[in-house]
Amino acid sequence: MPTTEPVPERVPAPGAARFPVVDPATGEAFDEAPDQQPDELDAVVGRARRAWSVWRADPAARSTALRAAAEAVEAAGEGLARSLTREQGKPLAESYAEVARTAARLRYFAGLAPRTRPIDDGRPVRSEVRWRSLGPVAAIVPWNFPLQLAAAKFAPALAAGNTVVLKPSPFTPLATRMLGSVLASVLPEDVLTVVTGREPLGARLASHPGIRHVTFTGSVPTGRAVARAAADSLARVTLELGGNDAAVLLDDVDVERIADRLFWAAFRNCGQVCMAVKRLYVPARLHADVVEALAQRAKTVTVGPGLDPATELGPVNNAPQLARIQQLTRQALANGARAAAGGHRQDGPGYFFAPTVLVDVPPDSPVVTGEQFGPVLPVLAYRSLDEAVEAANGTGFGLGGSVWGTDLDRAGAVAERLDCGTAWVNHHAELSLAQPFAGVKDSGVGVAGGPWGLYGNLRPFVVHRPPEA
Ligand code: NAD
C-alpha cells in the first residue's frame, strides 16, 4: 500500500454503529462494542504499515516493549479476567489462567530472536540466511480463548518485527478491546490495533491487499473462506482449525487414577477447546467402569455462572453453539444412544447444557464424526486395538490425540500411530509455549508455537557474496 496517503481519524465518529454483547450466563445483552465497517480497514492497515517501518528496525527495542507488555497485562489481570468471564462464560479462575498465559506468551517471544545461518555446501561462496519481517499481519481469532489465542498470534508476529491488526470474535470483543488498550499504553502507536465488528469485517481483513500474513484460528469452513480471501493478495496464511481429538484407553489403564484428568480433558471450558477430548475409545471390558467414573463426575460437577467462585463449569458461550450441541445430542439419542449423564439443556436462563456422557452411540453419528465443541462426550467400546486406532484416525481432523495406560512404553508406541499434530500419553492438551503447534488434515496449515511460530512470521533473506580474497 502507498504510505503517502492522508491518514483519516483514528477515533470512531460519535454515533458510530455498535453491536450488543451477551452474557452467556444470563442470555442477556450487558454491553456493546463498536461495529466497525470494512471501509475503515484501509486506514487501519495503512497505519499498521507506517508503524511497521519503525517497529521492524530495532529488535532490542521490540524485546523491551514486549516484556513491558507482559507486565502491563499482569497488572491489568483482574479487570481482564472479569471482562473475559462475563462475555465468554468460563469460571473466573480459568480467566485468570488465560490472562497469565497471555503475559507468559509475550514474555516468551520477547526472548526469541531469529538466527542468521551460514550456508555451508562446500562451494567457494559466502552465503547467509537472514530473516526479515513480513509487514502488517491480520490476526483473526474465535471466542473460546479470546486473549490466549490472540496472544498466540500477535506475540510471535510482533516479536518478528511485524505489526498486527487483531480481530476478535463478535461474541467476545470486550476483553480483547481492554487488552488492546492495556498494550497501547506500552507499545508504539499502531503496532497493535484491535478492530471489532460483525461480518464481513473478518472477510475483508483477510482479503485486504495491505496484509502480508493472515493468521487465523477458528472453524474449518471459515478457515477455507480465509484461505480463499487471502489468495488474491497472495498473503501468507496460517490456519489453526477445528479438532475432533480421540483419546484411546488401553486395557491396563487405572480408571480411577485417570478419571479426573480425563474428565477435565473433555469438559474444561465446557468442551469448547480445539484440543478437548471429543471421542473416547475404551476396551469393551472396561467400558462400564469408565462410563460410571465419568458420569459420576458429570453429575456432580458444579455448573453455574463463571463469576460465582463455586463454579467449575460455566455456560456454553453463545446461542448458535448451544443450538448446535442440542441438535447433535438429540440426533444421537434418536439414533439409539443413551445419556449416562446429562443429555439436555439445563433449566433456567443462560446457555447452560448439562455435562453429558453418551453411550451406545452409532460410530457414524455426527456427534462422533464431527466437532461437537461442547460439554458432550461419546464413549465408544472397542474390541481390538487396531480397530480403536483406525477409528481414532478415521475423521477428517488431525489436531491432537492421546493414549492412556499403565505401561508407558506401550502407550507411547500406540500414541505414535495417531495421525495428528500432537499426541499425549496419560494427558491431553498440555502445551508448552516452546513446542510447535500444527494440525494435520483439515485441522490446519502452517506451524505456530515456539521458534516455529516466530519463523512463521518471517521470510528468509539470503545474502550471497564471493569469499574473502
Ligand atoms: P469461526 O470460524 O466461526 O470464527 C472464527 C473467527 O473468524 C471469528 O473472529 C469470526 O468472527 C471470524 N470470521 C467469521 N467469518 C469469517 C470470514 N468469512 N472471513 C474471516 N473471518 C471470519 O469459529 P468460532 O465458532 O469462533 O470458534 C470455534 C472454532 O474454532 C472451532 O472449530 C474450534 O475447533 C476452532 N479453534 C481452533 C483452535 C486451534 O488452535 N486449532 C483453537 C481454538 C478454536
Image (spheres, grey):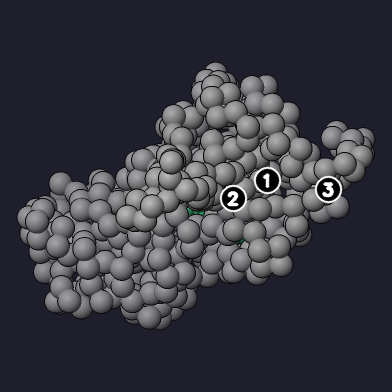
Left or right, 363 with reference to 464: left
The crowd level at tag 2 (other Cα within 10 Å; few <14, some 14-19, many 20+) is many
Quarter, ligand 1: bottom right
Tag 1 residue: 136
Q: Amino acid at mark 2?
A: Val
**Which residue does the image show at 25% across and 53% down from the upper left?**
424
Q: Could you tell me which secondary element the residue under label 2 belongs to? A: loop
Residue 443, percent across and down?
Answer: 45, 64
**Which is in the foreground here, disc 2 or disc 1?**
1
Q: Nearer the viewer, residue 19 or 427?
A: 427
Q: Amino acid at mark 1?
A: Pro
Tag 2 residue: 141
In the picture, the disc for residue 247 is none
**210 shown above or below 18:** below
**255 shown above or below 189:** below
Quadrant hosting residue 7: top right
Mark 2 Cβ and ligand 1 under 8 Å apart = yes
Q: Could you tell me which secondary element the residue under label 1 belongs to? A: strand
Q: Earlier in the sequence, mark 3 or mark 2?
A: 3
Residue 274, percent across and down?
Answer: 44, 55
Quadrant hosting residue 391: bottom left
**Label 2 – label 1 distance at C-alpha:** 16 Å
Tag 3 residue: 2
User: Is residue 318 in sight in this rendering?
Assistant: no
Residue 401, percent across and down?
Answer: 30, 60
The quadrant the C terminus occupies is top left
**Which residue does the image show at 59% across and 37% down from the upper left?**
161
Residues at marks 3 and 2 touching, judged by CB atoms closer than 8 Å: no
Left or right, 49 with reference to 293: right
The crowd level at tag 1 (other Cα within 10 Å; few <14, some 14-19, many 20+) is many
Residue 374, percent across and down?
Answer: 46, 57
User: Is residue 443 in sight in this rendering?
Assistant: yes
